[in-house]
Amino acid sequence: MASVRKHSVEQLEKDISIWTWMGRILPLIYVPISIVAYYYYQDTISILTAVTLIISPLVAIIWWWWAMDTMKWLSILYDTTIDKQLEIIKELREIKDSLNDNRHSDRKW
């Protein structure tokens, strides 16, 4: 069971890593493309559109950076939470076994 859970967490972290880099790189590529498009097509693109083309990916970059780091933190939190829950379940089973042993030993008297 632990190996299945561990494998799924590793896969989740790998998937998050791929989306993290895509979310960070694609908006960064969009900024120079926007600047080049404005430079070559400034007759047809107004100043407001050019500013929008430059500011919108910067907002996207900042948001994706925060979102991907948050997802990474949540996956780590999820993994540690499961480990703690498994530890609590193990301790509860030990307490249950101990109580059962005490009940059986009390009946002998």
Image (cartoon, rainbow, N blue to C red):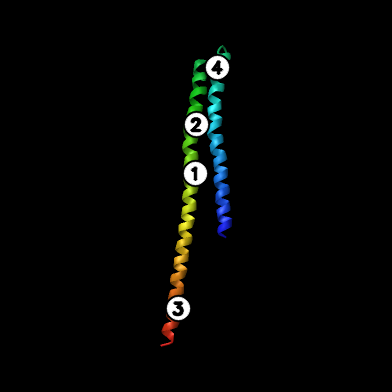
Amino acid under disc 1: Lys
Instruction: Count neighbours of disc 2 (C-alpha within 10 A) and say few if under 14, some if 14 to 19, many if 20 or more.
Output: many
Q: Which SS class for mark 1? A: helix
Query: Which quadrant, please, contains the C terminus?
Result: bottom left
Query: Which quadrant, please, contains the N terminus?
Result: bottom right
Mark 1–mark 3 Cα distance, whole angstroms, equals: 44 Å
Amino acid under disc 4: Tyr
In the image, 9 versus 56, the foreground residue is 9
Mark 4–mark 3 Cα distance, whole angstroms, equals: 79 Å
In the image, 104 versus 58, the foreground residue is 104
Residue position for label 4: 38
Mark 1–mark 4 Cα distance, whole angstroms, equals: 36 Å
Query: Which is nearer the N-term, disc 4 or disc 2?
Result: 4
Mark 2–mark 1 Cα distance, whole angstroms, equals: 16 Å
Amino acid under disc 2: Ile
Residue 11 vertical placement versus 67 (above, below): below
Instruction: Count neighbours of disc 1 (C-alpha within 10 A) and say few if under 14, some if 14 to 19, many if 20 or more.
Output: some
Circle nearer the viewer, 2 or 1: 1
Instruction: Provide residue 15's location: percent of width, then percent of height.
Output: 57, 43
For the image, the number of numbered tags is 4
Query: Which is nearer the N-term, disc 2 or disc 1?
Result: 2
Circles 4 and 3, Cβ within 8 Å, touching? The answer is no
Residue position for label 1: 72
Residue position for label 2: 61
Query: Which is nearer the N-term, disc 1 or disc 4?
Result: 4
Residue 102 lies in what quarter of the image?
bottom left
Residue drawn at x 49%, y 51% is 78
Residue 36 lies in what quarter of the image?
top right
